């Protein structure tokens, strides 16, 4: 199958540091190549891939030192390149939210659009009602709740290569927080949980420009006031095995409808249990009492983190391998691609095994192939 993967341009594929969507696209692309498919990746030129790379700009947007740049212009250029080559592909898989909808109506029946973000925003229902011909994939069932009428084709949970993270059979006794310093991720709760347990907490997180005030006024004072908290900063994939594998538990005390939460399966790949607030996708990812604990309050999180060491780390890794490998994700997407292609209008229908009598030309009939 000839497949185009169209990624956002904010991070490299895979990202050098923080980045969720582009990391998933990288894992999916490589797994599809491993399964024997002809994949073209539309991304920035700093992408690392065994697929055919169609470079759109010289480097990803976020770490580009240029003082002035336009993310809209970059993505418009990429979409134009995809349009120029659209007829080359059996499937075009977009990871760019809805920005391509007005331009790809002609090819809508050969597209898949995975939505990676939150969907409870005011203006989204009109968009997905207006361009309902585009088939959508959710990354959790919970993500769909704000848009129940959208053209959902499947839910496909994220996956990662099994050899990307090292399994750790025992922890070094600290708790971990990995992600962004932002109000919805609730790093303040992570600090509170660690303080109540009197356990060290390591925080590996990036601070976006939009969250600098929150960092400076809320989180940084909490970090500096506690000798138990070590702020590591933003880390890349090559550092995550040691960081997550050494943790007794990953704290995931979110306060928003998390669409998936890639960090949860990253921890599971290392054998590390996850203590997560029951919010968004977490009940779909965490098996309570097996790969971690689902809680409803900070007090419950404190109790859960205190008994996380009782969980079987080898069993946690085994559940990751079964449910969240990159190959499993790719196979689920191939099912989606096949289903969409099978439903294309005017697709060839199988010929009936009936021999019709030969008729004179003036008696010949034409038959429309059913959709």
Image (cartoon, rainbow, N blue to C red):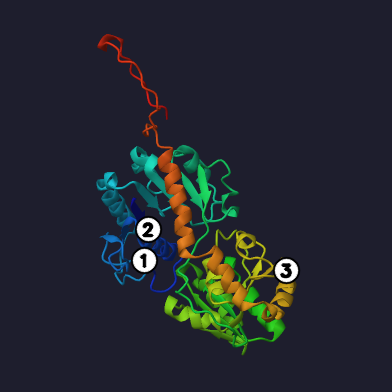
Q: In screen coordinates, is 293 left or right of 99?
A: right
Judging depth in this view, the residue of 192 and 153 nearest the camera is 153
x%, y% of residue 95? 41, 55
User: Image point 45% across, 53% down: which residue?
Assistant: 333
Query: Does 169 sit above or below residue 30?
Result: below
Q: For the point 30% across and 15% down, which residue is it?
A: 358
**SS for tag 1?**
loop
Residue 253: where, in percent of width, then height? 63, 70
How many numbered marks does the figure carry?
Answer: 3
In primary-sequence order, the first of circles 2 and 1 is 2
Q: Is 216 rendered above or below residue 184?
A: below
Q: Position of residue 336 (x, y in %)?
A: 46, 48
Q: Sequence order check: which comes first, mark 3 or mark 1?
A: 1
In the picture, residue 279 is in which quadrant? bottom right
In the depicted view, which residue is nearer to us: 313 or 244? 313
* Mark 1 surroundings within 10 Å by alpha-carbon count, few (fewer than 14), some (14 through 19), many (20 or more): many
Q: Is residue 297 left or right of residue 152?
A: right
Q: Is residue 2 above or below residue 162?
A: above
Residues marked 2 and 1 touching at CB (< 8 Å): yes
Say which mark, if any, is on residue 13.
1
- Does 21 sit left or right of 198 as displayed? left
Mark pair 2, 1: CA separation: 8 Å
The Cα atoms of the two marked residues, 3 and 1, are separated by 36 Å
Q: Nearer the viewer, mark 3 or mark 1?
A: 1
For numbered disc 2, what is the local secondary structure? loop
Q: Residue at x 50, y 39 (%)?
A: 129
| Label 3 Cα neighbours within 10 Å, binned few <14 / some 14-19 / many ≥20 | few
Circle on res. 297? 3
- Does the image show residue 233? no
Report helix, strand or loop for mark 3: loop
């Amino acid at each position: 199958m000839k497949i185009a993967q169209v990624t956002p341009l904010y991070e490299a594929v895979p990202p050098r540091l923080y980045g969720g969507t582009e990391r998933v696209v990288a894992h999916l692309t490589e797994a599809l190549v491993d399964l024997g498919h002809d994949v073209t990746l539309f991304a920035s030129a700093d992408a690392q891939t065994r697929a055919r790379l169609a470079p759109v700009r010289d480097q990803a947007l976020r770490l580009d030192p240029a003082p002035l740049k336009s993310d809209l212009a970059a993505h418009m250029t990429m979409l134009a390149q995809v349009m120029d080559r659209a007829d080359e592909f059996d499937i075009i898989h977009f990871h760019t939210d809805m920005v391509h909808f007005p331009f790809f109506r002609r090819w809508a029946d050969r597209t898949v659009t995975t939505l990676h973000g939150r969907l409870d925003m005011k203006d989204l229902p009109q968009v997905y009602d207006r361009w309902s011909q585009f088939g959508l994939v959710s990354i959790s069932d919970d993500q769909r709740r704000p848009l129940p009428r959208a053209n959902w084709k499947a839910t496909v949970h994220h996956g990662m290569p099994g050899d990307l993270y090292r399994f750790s059979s025992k922890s070094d006794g600290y708790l971990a927080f990995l992600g962004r310093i932002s109000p919805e991720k609730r790093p303040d709760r992570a600090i509170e949980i660690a303080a109540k347990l009197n356990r060290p907490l390591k925080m590996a997180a990036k601070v976006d420009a939009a969250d600098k005030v929150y960092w400076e006024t809320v989180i940084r004072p909490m970090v500096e006031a506690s000798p138990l908290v070590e702020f590591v900063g933003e880390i890349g994939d090559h550092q995550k095995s040691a960081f997550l594998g050494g943790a007794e538990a990953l704290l995931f005390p979110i306060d928003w409808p998390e669409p998936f939460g890639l960090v949860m399966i990253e921890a599971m790949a290392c054998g590390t249990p996850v203590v997560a607030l029951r919010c968004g996708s977490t009940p779909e990812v965490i098996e309570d009492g097996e790969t971690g604990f689902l809680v409803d309050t900070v007090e419950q999180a404190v109790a859960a983190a205190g008994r996380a060491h009782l969980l079987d780390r080898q069993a946690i890794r085994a559940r990751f391998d079964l449910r969240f490998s990159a190959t499993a994700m790719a196979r689920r997407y191939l099912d989606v691609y096949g289903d969409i292609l099978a439903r294309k209008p005017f697709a060839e229908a199988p010929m009936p095994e009936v021999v019709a009598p030969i008729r004179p030309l003036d008696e010949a009939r034409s038959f429309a192939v059913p959709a």
